[in-house]
Image (cartoon, helix red, strand yellow):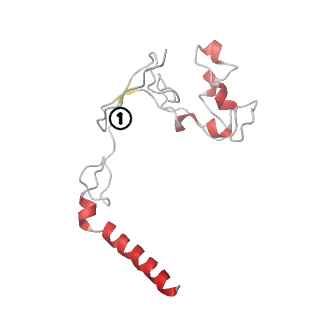
Amino acid sequence: MKKYMSLVVLSCVASCLLMASPAAAETVQSLRGAREIESPSQKPEVEKLIADQRPIKRDFVQQPPLIPHKTEGYLVTRNYNKCLSCHSWANYKSAGATKISPTHFVDSHGKELTNVAPRRYFCVQCHVTQADAPVLIENTFEPMQAIK
């Protein structure tokens, strides 16, 4: 048994050494470019937001909708959520906003709640502001056509 454990430990160490080799490190591509990890990050350029317009069409069924307006300075804390001042079921009509989906009132155990579920309370976890930004990584994704 001791021989077997020694072989397992030895193979794990060998695997780690191979993965840490310079050849493996050279093949890793990063959005930061060819910069050392210890070098300071550059401040990202803020993309031009697409100001108050119709939301961009979603590409797949469970995709969270994009936010079609500026959100800079919106306060979302444990005790207050600026988004709810317009998007709550009580305020959406008077604000002319989209109401929160009923799925946001279901907790992780499937129980329906009277308020927004804690796991859905911090809106910008899933929803992002629309921006006129370049594609970071080219891809060939095409949304699936709905079955008629």
Q: Nearer the viewer, residue 14 or 108?
A: 14
38, above or below 95, in the image: below
| Residue 28 image offset from top left, x and y in percent | 28, 55
| Residue 80 image offset from top left, x and y in percent | 65, 35
Callout 1, which amino acid?
Val
Q: Nearer the viewer, residue 56 or 95?
A: 56
Q: Residue at x 44, y 16 (%)?
A: 53
Q: Residue at x 67, y 39 (%)?
A: 118
Position of 87 compared to 139: left or right?
right
Residue 117: tell me if it is visible: yes
Position of 143 compared to 94: left or right?
left
| Residue 114 image offset from top left, x and y in percent | 76, 30
Position of 9 compared to 122: left or right?
left
Residue 121: tell me if it is visible: no
Q: Secondary structure at mark 1?
A: loop
Q: Residue 48 falls in which quadrant of the image?
A: top left
Position of 77 compared to 144: left or right?
right
24, above or below 8, in the image: above
Farthest residue to the bottom: give it.
2
Q: Residue at x 64, y 13 (%)?
A: 93
Q: Which residue has dot 1 on it? A: 46
| Residue 68 image offset from top left, x and y in percent | 47, 22
20, above or below 100, in the image: below
Q: Residue 39 falls in which quadrant of the image?
A: bottom left
